[in-house]
Image (spheres, rainbow, N blue to C red):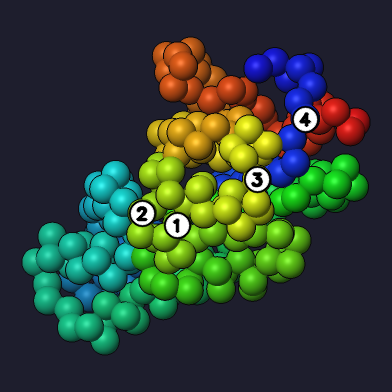
Amino acid sequence: MALNEKVNVKALLFDYDDTIMDVSEARSYARQVIAHELSLITNFSVEHILGIIRNIEIRMESIGQFDRRIWFREVVKTLGVEFGSDEINRLVKIYWDSWRSKSRLFPDVMPTLGELRRCGLRLGIVTNTDGEPGLKRDRIRKDGVYELFDVIVVAGDDTSHVKPHPEPFIRALQILNMRGNEAIYVGDRISTDVPGAKAVGMYTGIIDRYNNIVPGFNEYGNSGPDFVIHSLLELLQMLKCT
């Protein structure tokens, strides 16, 4: 699909973190705060602990495990220290409080959503759980965008499976009472955001804000996204109402 190819859809659905919300600083800052806390306790360097956190984060996300309690239990185990549930819970609270303090809406979000709404399109979010039931939905409320969307599906909280499984996308379509080819889904990760949406017939797009994805775009062939954009505002070029 070319960006100048007009499509006739009824809904635009989005991933949340790194698509709607700029959390690159939030993620880095939350890691740093936890590494500093653990450094004070263990005497390992912050950099050493950061390396452990990043490695465990990658491994956990690859298997669809988003519960930071499990992450941090693995971190402290790797460091050779024992933490009780209260200490782990304290780390989780510090982590998410730190994350929220640095999380920001991308500047293209509000103008794009306003124009999409003007076009009569339904809007939604399909996003993975934060590992604790209700936490991601609470974040969306506190970020001030909850009321902007007609449907919000938190995969893993509202469904049995997380993305890239098709179930969260099926749930969103059921709520909207639409077919897959009546919706576009936009996320930031090809491996997570494309397969499930494509499996139910949605148009799929990847937002590549940092020019990280485009060089490998063609490697995915028919299993890749229908289009790649660098700003959500580019979506407006694709809609017949414009």
Residues at marks 3 and 2, CA–CA distance in whole angstroms:
21 Å
For the N terminus, the quadrant is: top right
What's under tag 4, amino acid-wise? Asn
Q: Are marks 3 and 4 in contact (CB under 8 Å)?
A: no
Residue 55 vs residue 8, the one in the foreground: 8
What residue lies at 26% left-to-right and 62% top-to-bottom?
Answer: 71
Q: Nearer the viewer, mark 2 or mark 4?
A: 4
Element carrying mark 3: loop
Residues at marks 1 and 2, CA–CA distance in whole angstroms:
6 Å
Where is residue 204? Give x, y as percent: 58, 31
Q: Earlier in the sequence, mark 4 or mark 1?
A: 4
Q: Which residue is mark 2?
A: 161
- Left-right relation of 52 to 235: left
Residues at marks 3 and 4, CA–CA distance in whole angstroms:
13 Å
Which disc number belongs to residue 155?
A: 1
Q: Which residue is mark 3?
A: 178
Q: Can I make out residue 8 in this image? A: yes
